[in-house]
């Protein structure tokens, strides 16, 4: 009964709560690739695109096998959150020369690209559409277009403070919903990924605390054994 209730709550949180509808952005047709080596040298900020990095929409069969609605909802949200954060991380090389912030951004970017690739692969394995149901929505932990504009206008310490707040919000929310997936999810590959998201997110939050302890919002979320 507890597991069923937790699953219902998680699906509701992922699909309804905090999902403020907005106009959808343009679709992108590129497919996520495994994380590249990051050695940025550009002096100009890259064009910021908050549109999803997803394959074109296809007609897919309903999810089958051991993937549950909770698994599908969590994978879709995880992919959507990664896609929203990646353009922020791509701004870092042009907005700061601090090696600590650059290194952290490169580490988080590698993790987010790997999570995006893995989430889309599992959605494909599940027979679920890999299109983004959260496109155009601003949800907890997601950076908005207005916030990206503010980041592009900042450099140095002001940029670090803004970046720290957005990273902390993203990593904390991603860990929170991943803990819920661990407790209520059904498919071993999805719950194993959730465990990795919590572990990696906690590690990144610890590094962030060392760089900018003044914006710490408390201890990072941790997973409990299922």
Image (spheres, helix red, strand yellow):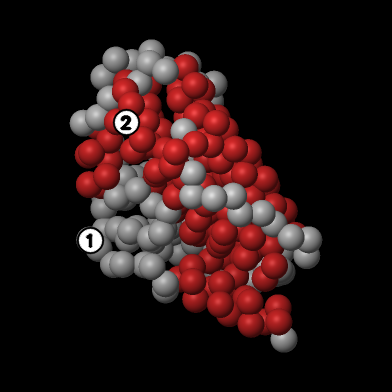
Q: Which mark is residue 159?
A: 2
Q: Quadrant of the C terminus?
A: bottom right
- Residue occupying image coordinates x 29% and y 15%: 43
Looking at the image, the residue that sits furthest to the front is 214
Q: Residues within 10 Å of mark 2 (few under 14, many from 20)?
A: some
- Taking the spot 26% from the left edge, 19% from the top edge, the residue there is 44
Q: Nearer the viewer, residue 105 or 218?
A: 218
The residue nearer to you, when weighing 28 against 168, is 168
Residue, far right: 225
Q: Mark 1: few, some, or many residues within 10 Å (few <14, many ≥20)?
A: few
Is 149 above or below relative to 185?
Answer: above
- For the question of whether residue 52 can be seen, the reply is no
- The quadrant in which the N terminus is found is bottom right
Q: Residue at x 69, y 62 (%)?
A: 182
Question: Residue 133, relative to residue 210: is it above or below?
Answer: below
Q: 71 left or right of 55?
A: right
Of labels 1 and 2, the one closer to you: 2
Residue 158, quarter of the rendered image = top left
> What is the secondary structure assignment of the residue under circle 1?
loop
Which label's residue is closer to the chain start, 1 or 2?
Answer: 1
Q: Image point 64% across, 82% down: which residue?
A: 5
Q: CA distance from mark 1 to mark 2?
A: 28 Å
* Residue 184 in view of the camera: yes
User: Mark 2: which secondary structure?
Assistant: helix
Q: Nearer the viewer, residue 154 or 63?
A: 154
Marking on residue 23? 1
Total residue callouts: 2
Q: Position of residue 217 (x, y in %)?
A: 49, 49
Q: Is residue 9 above or below residue 82?
A: below
């Amino acid at each position: 009964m507890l597991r069923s209730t937790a699953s219902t709550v998680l699906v509701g949180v992922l699909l309804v709560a905090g999902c403020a509808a907005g106009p959808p952005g343009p679709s992108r047709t590129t497919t996520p690739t495994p994380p590249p080596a990051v050695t940025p040298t550009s002096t100009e900020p890259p064009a910021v695109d908050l549109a999803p990095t997803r394959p074109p929409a296809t007609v897919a069969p309903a999810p089958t096998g051991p993937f549950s609605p909770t698994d599908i909802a969590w994978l879709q949200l995880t992919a959507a959150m990664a896609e929203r954060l990646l353009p922020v991380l791509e701004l870092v090389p042009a907005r700061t020369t601090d090696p600590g912030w650059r290194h952290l951004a490169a580490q988080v970017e590698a993790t987010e690209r790997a999570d995006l690739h893995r989430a889309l692969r599992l959605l494909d394995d599940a027979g679920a559409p890999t299109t983004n149901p959260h496109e155009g929505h601003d949800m907890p932990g997601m950076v908005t277009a207005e916030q990206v504009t503010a980041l592009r206008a900042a450099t140095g310490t002001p940029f670090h403070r803004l970046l720290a707040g957005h990273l902390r919000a993203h990593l904390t929310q991603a860990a929170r919903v991943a803990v819920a997936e661990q407790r209520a999810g059904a498919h071993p590959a999805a719950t194993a990924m959730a465990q990795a998201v919590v572990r990696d997110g906690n590690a990144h939050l610890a590094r962030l605390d060392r760089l900018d302890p003044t914006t710490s919002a408390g201890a990072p979320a941790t997973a409990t054994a299922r």
